[in-house]
Image (spheres, grey):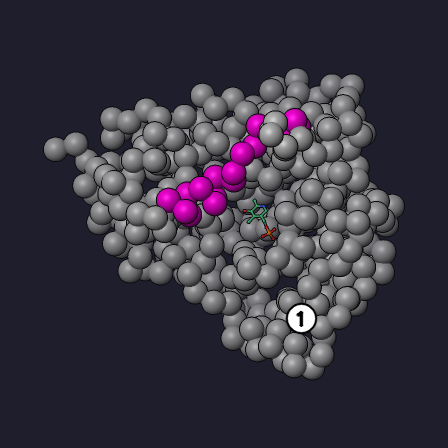
């Protein structure tokens, strides 16, 4: 049989997360590849999902999502960001941020439209752009004084007559950069000058460290009307398996996204929505505790990786530390990632897979620190074997 997969998806293969998690399982290695926590979210939130199932919240929720969750998202955005979204019409519940991103791109980008992505980028973006028949235009994030950022000239040069949207992920996976207000303002100015949409992935909105503030793009002057703001419960409440996310935007944009969503999944799981509504209202103190504990884990992993000989970048948010493998004498992160189980019994993700221009990220390796302290300690003890003696 000829290759059955449609041509526009052939470049993607298996997602790196499945591949690396399978490698970890097969080799019995510590998995610092895929970014999922190894502890549960707040107990009352978990109980709330169980109670919802027992109470019979087991049939199709309404297409836009349960009113409880849309109301809770509206309250959250008002309280944290001073952003007002109408629960009826301006908020759509999705199957995680992944569906929100894919449905937004499919709904808002014509075939041939261009979408600007900051590379390295979360791998689902490129696939969603390809499914839409749109074209990605990468703009590099490069380390400048220990932090990944973009060159404003490169960003400006990426905008052309077919540009439809700029996809902005902050806090940024995999670099850990949290865009500053100045950086966001540059992006916002281009969006307004060229009449572009901003599609924002804010799944790590609560996971910033050292007092660094997360600024939603929609809070910048003139941006609410052209921003599709996306987040989800997975990272905030340590429930990556619940796949409950949301889109907030002006009604015509949300309505467009729902037009696609209704034929992909129609609606999203009901019990999770009840529990996440509870969590958004009642569990933000728990999230503050998670943030503090992640900051300590970040330091623990950074210290260990530095001692093992990696070049280490300090993330201001997310679950991830970005490293440079060249000080250890390696040059290709993909090759090292494949050999790491045998060399050290650890799995990490080669950052180059998140680039269009692979060479830009060849020497980076991403490690996740959303793991128990003893796991991090064991991983860094093993990685210490890498140092050339
Ligand atoms: C985890 C992650 C997602 C996916 O979120 P879900 O809610 O699990 O679909 C999207 N974007 C980034 C940057 C992520 O790290």
Instruction: Give the residue displayed 59% in from the left and 61% down from the top.
Output: 242
Q: In x, y percent, where is residue 98? A: 64, 47
Say whether mark 1 is within 8 Å of ligand 1. no
Q: Is residue 345 above or below residue 143?
A: below
Q: Residue furthest left?
A: 389
> From what the image shows, is residue 264 above or below residue 148?
below
Considering only vertical position in the picture, is 237 above or below 361? below
Q: Which residue is mark 1?
A: 271
At mark 1, the secondary structure is helix
At horizontal 48% and vertical 39% (from top left) the residue drawn is 16
Image point (66%, 20%), residue name: 158
Graded by Cα atoms within 10 Å as few (under 14), some (14 to 19) or many (20 or more), the crowding at tag 1 reads many
Q: Give the image location of residue 52, x and y in percent.
A: 67, 77
The span picked out in magenta is 7-23
* Magenta stretch, overall SS: helix
Q: Nearer the viewer, residue 334 or 378?
A: 334
Give the x, y percent position of residue 45.
Answer: 58, 73
Quadrant holding the C terminus: top left
Task: Using the rendered image of the protein, determine whether residue 350 is visible from the camera's viewpoint.
Answer: yes
Above-or-below relation of 275 to 360? below
- Write the residue at 57% across / 67% down: 284
Q: Quadrant of the N terminus?
A: top right
């Amino acid at each position: 049989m000829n290759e059955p997969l449609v041509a526009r998806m052939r470049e993607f293969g298996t997602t790196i997360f499945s591949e690396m998690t399978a490698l970890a399982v097969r080799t019995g290695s510590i998995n610092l590849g895929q970014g999922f926590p190894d502890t549960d979210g707040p107990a009352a939130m978990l109980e709330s999902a169980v109670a919802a199932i027992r109470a019979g919240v087991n049939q199709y929720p309404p297409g836009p999502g349960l009113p409880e969750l849309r109301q809770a998202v509206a309250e959250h955005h008002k309280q944290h960001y001073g952003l007002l979204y109408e629960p009826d019409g301006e908020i759509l519940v999705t199957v995680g941020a992944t569906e929100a991103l894919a449905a937004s791109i499919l709904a808002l980008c014509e075939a041939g439209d261009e979408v600007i992505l900051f590379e390295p980028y979360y791998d689902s973006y490129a696939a969603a752009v390809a499914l839409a028949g749109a074209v990605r235009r990468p703009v590099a994030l490069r380390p400048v004084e220990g932090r990944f950022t973009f060159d404003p000239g490169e960003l400006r040069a990426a905008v052309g007559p077919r540009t439809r949207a700029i996809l902005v992920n902050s806090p940024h996976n995999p670099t850990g950069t949290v865009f500053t207000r100045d950086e966001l303002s540059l992006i916002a100015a281009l969006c307004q000058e060229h009449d572009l949409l901003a599609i924002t992935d804010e799944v790590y909105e609560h996971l910033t460290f050292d007092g660094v503030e997360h600024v939603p793009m929609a809070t910048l002057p003139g941006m609410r009307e052209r921003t599709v703001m996306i987040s989800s419960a997975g990272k905030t409440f340590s429930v990556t398996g619940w796949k409950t996310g949301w889109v907030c935007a002006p009604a015509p944009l949300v309505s467009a996204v729902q037009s696609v969503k209704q034929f992909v999944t129609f609606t999203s799981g009901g019990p999770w929505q009840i529990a996440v509504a509870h969590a958004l209202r009642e569990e933000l103190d728990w999230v503050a505790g998670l943030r503090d504990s992640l900051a300590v884990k970040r330091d623990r992993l950074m210290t260990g990786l530095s001692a093992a000989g990696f070049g280490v970048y300090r993330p201001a948010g997310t679950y991830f530390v970005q490293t440079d493998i060249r000080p250890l004498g390696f040059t290709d992160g993909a090759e090292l990632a494949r050999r790491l189980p045998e060399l050290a019994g650890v799995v990490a993700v080669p950052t180059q897979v998140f680039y269009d221009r692979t060479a830009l990220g060849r020497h980076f390796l991403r490690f996740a620190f959303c793991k128990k302290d003893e796991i991090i300690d064991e991983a860094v003890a093993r990685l210490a074997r890498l140092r050339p003696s």
